[in-house]
Image (tube, rainbow, N blue to C red):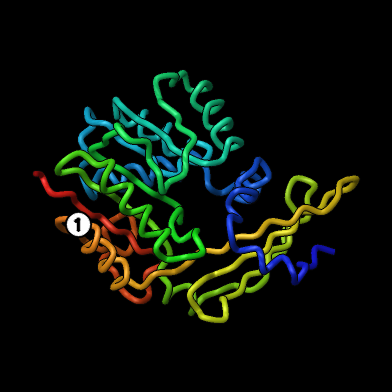
Amino acid sequence: MGRVQEGAWDRVSAWYEDTFSRDYLSLYPHRNDEEAKRDVQGIIELISPPRTEPLLDLCCGAGRHLVAFRQAGFCHVTGLDLSADLLAEARKRLQRESLDDVQLIRADMREIPEGLRYQTIVSLFTSFGYFEAAHEDERVLQSAHCALLPGGTLLLDTLNRAHVLANLVPIDHTELEGKTIHITRRISRDSLRVEKQTSITQPGSPQTLYHESVRMYEREELEEMLAKIGFASWHIYGDLEGQAFSATSERVVVVASKARS
């Protein structure tokens, strides 16, 4: 039960169009509101984003961080995501908290709508590296750079390739809310991507399969992209609390600034 079909590994292109459904939310019950509040507090202490200026959560998902930012006193908060299902969940979450002034946009992260400008853009929980070609990931950074106000800041939180290669857990098996969840992970043949297959089975329903494939970047590759795009300066950290980055860091947290003029 739950065996991953080998052919499904081949579906790299546009996997994100199918994976981020309501089922996706059930896979990460530990990604809760308290964690989001801790993340936002870490971001506040790390980069001191101005609360009165517009902030964009790029790939906002179900809106955990939108709520946390708004409750932390940020006045102009926007969430952008491609998944209609996750945006619907975000809207419900915001309504439960009486936060109807948060704007939600359905769009591709490579194409932040023209005319929208933000002082701060955050991309959290590995929302980078989704595309088959590296130049498409670069377009995400280019889009963010264009959408920043002069002097604005991009914070990008993604995987540390060295840590993933050294600590990959190939198989997980979980029983959750009547569902059997079987997860298989592997590194691609070129060692550039971490790939994950998730099968979900429950009595009376057909098996559901989801595929994820995320390109992992070295610090130097990210810095080359930032320089090419035109960011004025940047710092690399090992987590949202501002710890120094090293090969053993679980995360790569990029804080990049746009020129003031």
Question: How many other residues sit within 10 Å of disc 1, few (<14), some (14-19) or many (≥20)?
Answer: some
Residue occupying the point 57% across, 81% down = 189
Give the number of callouts: 1
Dot 1 falls on a residue whose secondary structure is loop
Q: Position of residue 151 (x, y in %)?
A: 14, 44
> Which quarter of the figure has residue 148?
top left
Q: Position of residue 139 (x, y in %)?
A: 37, 55
Q: Which residue is mark 1?
A: 230
- Position of residue 115 relative to residue 30, above or below, is above
Of 167 and 62, nearer the camera is: 62
Q: Is residue 34 visible?
A: no
Position of 160 with respect to 28 (left or right) is left
Position of 60 with respect to 200 (left or right) is left
Q: Image quadrant for the C terminus?
A: top left
Q: Position of residue 6 (x, y in %)?
A: 75, 72
Residue occupying the point 45% across, 29% down = 104
Residue occupying the point 16% across, 58% down = 233
Q: Is residue 231 visible?
A: yes
> Which quarter of the figure has residue 3?
bottom right
Of 204 and 195, nearer the camera is: 195
Q: Position of residue 91 (x, y in %)?
A: 53, 27
Residue occupying the point 23% across, 63% down = 228
Position of 239 with respect to 67 (left or right) is left
